[in-house]
Image (cartoon, rainbow, N blue to C red):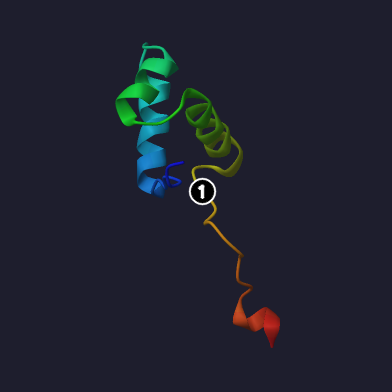
Amino acid sequence: MGQRRRFTQEFKRQAVQLLNASQRPAAEIARELGSRRNRLYKWQKEVAVRGGAFPGSGRQVESTAELA
């Protein structure tokens, strides 16, 4: 099996912008970007819900003020 591919937040934002602005099918755009169609839809949904912010991978760290 291959390694899991990671995408930057900027890449995800640009992919969603391309998906929203284009009249082409999502599958075609995904192939060009080296991703999967369902992943584009997932990113599109995250942008709609969170306003463009993608959470980082791994455990989220609490702020030091909350810990104190």
Does 14 appear above or below 53?
Answer: above
Q: Quadrant location of residue 29?
A: top left
Q: Residue furthest left?
A: 32
Res. 33 image quadrant:
top left
| Of residues 65 and 9, the one drawn nearer to the viewer in this rendering | 9
Residue 11 pos. (x, y %): 35, 42
Up/down of 12 relative to 57, above or below: above
Q: Position of residue 28 (x, y in %)?
A: 36, 16
Identify whether 22 is placed above or below 2.
above
Residue type at mark 1: give it. Answer: Phe
Q: Residue at x 61, y 82 (%)?
A: 64
Secondary structure at numbered mark 1? loop
Taking the spot 51% from the left edge, 48% from the top edge, the residue there is 54
Q: Relative to residue 45, is residue 12 drawn left or right?
A: left
- Left or right, 67 with respect to 57, comes to right
Q: Position of residue 15 (x, y in %)?
A: 38, 32
Identify which residue, 21 or 62, lies in the foreground: 62
The quadrant of the picture occupied by the C terminus is bottom right
Question: For mark 1, does the 10 Å Cα neighbourhood hold few (<14), some (14 to 19), or many (20 or more) residues?
Answer: some
The percent coordinates of residue 41 (x first, y second) are 53, 27
Q: Residue at x 36, y 12 (%)?
A: 24
Q: Is residue 2 above or below residue 30?
A: below
On screen, residue 57 versus residue 29, left or right, reads right
Q: Which residue is mark 1?
A: 54
Report the label total. Answer: 1
- In the picture provided, is 33 more to the left or to the right than 43? left
* Furthest residue toward front: 1
Residue at image point 51% right, 31% down: 39
